[in-house]
Amino acid sequence: MKKQYIYSIDNLRGLAILLVFFTHCQSFNLFDSLFQDFAKFFVGNATAIFVFISGFLFHYLQSKNFNFKKYLKQKSKFVITPYLFFISIATIIGLFFHVNEYYQLTNLQFIIWSLSVGGTVVAPLWFIPMICLFFLTAPVFISISKVSLKIMTVITVVSIILSLITDRPFSQYNPFLSYIHFLGFYMLGVYLSASHKVREGLYSHYQLVYALTITFFCILLGFYLYTRYVNGSETYGFINSFGKFNLIQGGKLCMTILLFVAFEHYFNHKNKVLGFFSHISFGIFFIHGFMLIIFSKLVNQWQLTDHPFLLLILETIFGLGGSVLLIEIGKKILGNRSRYVLGC
């Protein structure tokens, strides 16, 4: 029996990829410090929402007739193959500009390292090595989804706590630590897909969900702005931050639950704009980092403007618009084979 299409999750994925794009926009760094802090809290680590959606869709689509070998084959074709294409380009660029010398690595060492961690040259590519670890551990999540609700709830809560007391590894150069950091959000997605009772409870008490998530989000935002004002700096890295409550990640948990419920109520129907971005989300993931690097080089060379808001608009047009344009051109040229190269 074919699974019912969930427009709310599809639309949420469209929003998530837009938030991920804005996470990487450098124009925010030109705004005043208060606006930067607001922006970082709202869009920073938006990958967490994308990981949550990945967990939800994995269980929703795979749980009934899960075939690990078939699943890995599918992911190899439509995720790993495009990754190898784009990471090869990024690695060649890195070698051309002698990035390996900065890290004191030989060419061969840099190639192996770049393929393994993803984001050495084009930062957003770090995501793929990490998500591949979720692919490899897929049977574990299937097994967890079949235990009693109480046990699954405990596992989910512990996973979320782990995500809230860690930070992403320095420059995302360790996919294993990134896996641990985002585990709670992936597990939450699996949990809400597996537990119809919990999911319907959230939907039916949506007003309470809105009130609680917005309240806690604002409290966490207040604490974040206060700590930024008092300390003036943040602790980065998985090891250095371990055990410290991650305020931004806490905010993303509130946003994830809020958006999950809100989209079920208001966007559980076909939406052309969000649906469009959802369907090309992996393509944007692969390409937008390249486009933002090019934009940054152009800005530095031509001194386009010093106005941060105008620069953000230009960065969005070039980075996001350019990515969409390249994807559409690629799809026209490659046809049905575009998923092997572009991921969409």
Image (spheres, helix red, strand yellow):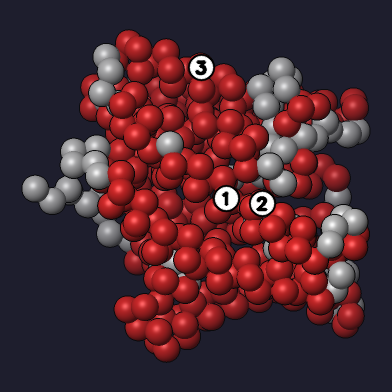
Q: Nearer the viewer, residue 287 or 219?
A: 287
Residue at screen point 35% across, 83% down: 335
Position of residue 318 measured from the top left corner of the image (x, y, whole percent)? 66, 76
Q: Nearer the viewer, residue 11 or 281?
A: 281
Position of residue 44 measured from the top left corner of the image (x, y, whole percent)? 66, 44
Observer-side mark, 3 or 1, equals 1
Mark seen at residue 117? 2
Secondary structure type for disc 2: helix
Mark seen at residue 158? 3
Q: Which three-letter amino acid code belongs to the residue tagged 3?
A: Val
On screen, residue 249 versus residue 155, left or right, reads right
**Distance from Cα at disc 3 to Cα at disc 1:** 24 Å
Q: Are marks 1 and 2 in contact (CB under 8 Å)?
A: yes
Q: Which three-letter amino acid code belongs to the residue tagged 1?
A: Pro
Q: Is 220 rendered above or below residue 56?
A: above
Secondary structure type for disc 1: helix
Q: Is 297 rendered above or below residue 44?
A: below
Observer-side mark, 3 or 2, equals 2
The residue pinned by badge 1 equals: 129
Secondary structure type for disc 3: helix
Q: Nearer the viewer, residue 162 or 249?
A: 162
Crowd rating for badge 1 (residues with CA inside 10 Å; few <14, some 14–19, many 20+): many
Pick the quarter of the image with the C terminus. bottom left
Q: Are marks 3 and 2 in contact (CB under 8 Å)?
A: no
N-terminal-most mark, 1 or 2: 2
N-terminal-most mark, 3 or 2: 2
Position of residue 179 measured from the top left corner of the image (x, y, whole percent)? 57, 37
N-terminal-most mark, 3 or 1: 1
Q: Nearer the viewer, residue 202 or 72?
A: 72
Q: Which three-letter amino acid code belongs to the residue tagged 2?
A: Val
